[in-house]
Image (cartoon, grey):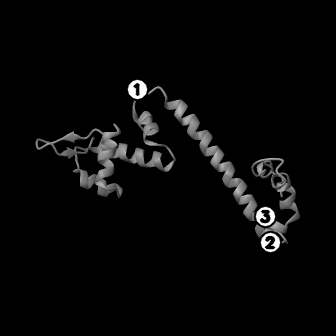
Amino acid sequence: MKSSATWAIGELAERFGLETHVLRHWEDRGLLAPERDAGGRRRYGEADAWRVAVILASKAAGLGLEQIRALVDGEARDRHRILEAQLAELDARADALARARHMAQHAMECEAHDITACPRFREHVADVVAGERVGLPFEAALRGTTL
C-alpha cells in the first residue's frame, strides 16, 4: 500500500539533516518537483523522499548534480556513459588510495626511520628527483611488487 503522507519542506529537510535551501536548490536544478498545496507551499511525498535519498547517496559516491539529474531522469540517454565514467573515476581513486596505503605501510615497516633515507624508496623515485620523469611511480605497488 502506498503512503499518502506528505511533508512540508522543513520536515523533509530535517528528516535528512539538510537545510531547506538545499531542497529548493535541487528543485531549481530539476532534481525535485514537489506538489504544491492550495496556499502554494511545497508538499513532499514519499517519492520525493526516495529521490532525496538517491541524490544524497549519489553525491556521497562523488556524482555532481548534473550527473544525478541524468540518473533520476527516466528519459536520459547518458545514464550508462555517466556511470561508466564514474566507475573509472572510482577505480582511479581506489588505485591512488592503494598506492598511498602501500607507501604508508612501507614507511611504517622500513628500517630507515626517515623515509627519505630509505634505499628502496629512493630507488623508486630517483628518476623523478633527477628530472627524467614526472610523477611518482608507485604503480608497482598495484602489481604486487614492493618498495
- In front of the other: label 3 or label 2? 2
Q: What secondary structure is found at the residue carrying circle 3?
A: helix
Residue 7 at x, y percent in the picture: 23, 50
Q: Residue at point 82% right, 56% down?
A: 129
- Which residue is depicted at the point 34% across and 37% down? 30
Q: Is residue 139 above or below residue 33?
A: below
Left or right for 90, reference 105? left
User: Residue flagged by tag 1: what amino acid is it?
Assistant: Glu
Mark 1 or mark 3: which comes first in sequence?
A: 1
Question: Label 2 crowding class (10 Å Cα cut-off): few <14, some 14-19, many 20+?
Answer: few
Distance between the alpha carbons at the discs numbered 3 and 2: 12 Å
Where does residue 41 sit, x and y in percent of width and height?
A: 17, 45
Q: Circle 2 sits on which residue?
A: 114
Please tell me how crowded label 3 is: few (under 14), some (14-19), or many (20+) other residues with Cα within 10 Å: some
Quick one: which residue is furthest to the front in this view? 131
Assess whether mark 2 and mark 3 are in contact (beta carbons under 8 angstroms). no
**Is 106 situated above or below 54?**
below
Label for residue 75?
1
Classify the position of the C terminus by image quarter.
Answer: bottom right
Give the residue type that dot 3 points to: His
Q: CA distance from mark 1 to mark 3?
A: 49 Å
Nearer the N terminus, badge 1 or badge 2?
Answer: 1
- The residue mark sitting in front, 1 or 3, is 3
Choose top left, top right, bottom left or bottom right for residue 107: bottom right
> Which marked residue is nearer to the observer: mark 1 or mark 2?
2
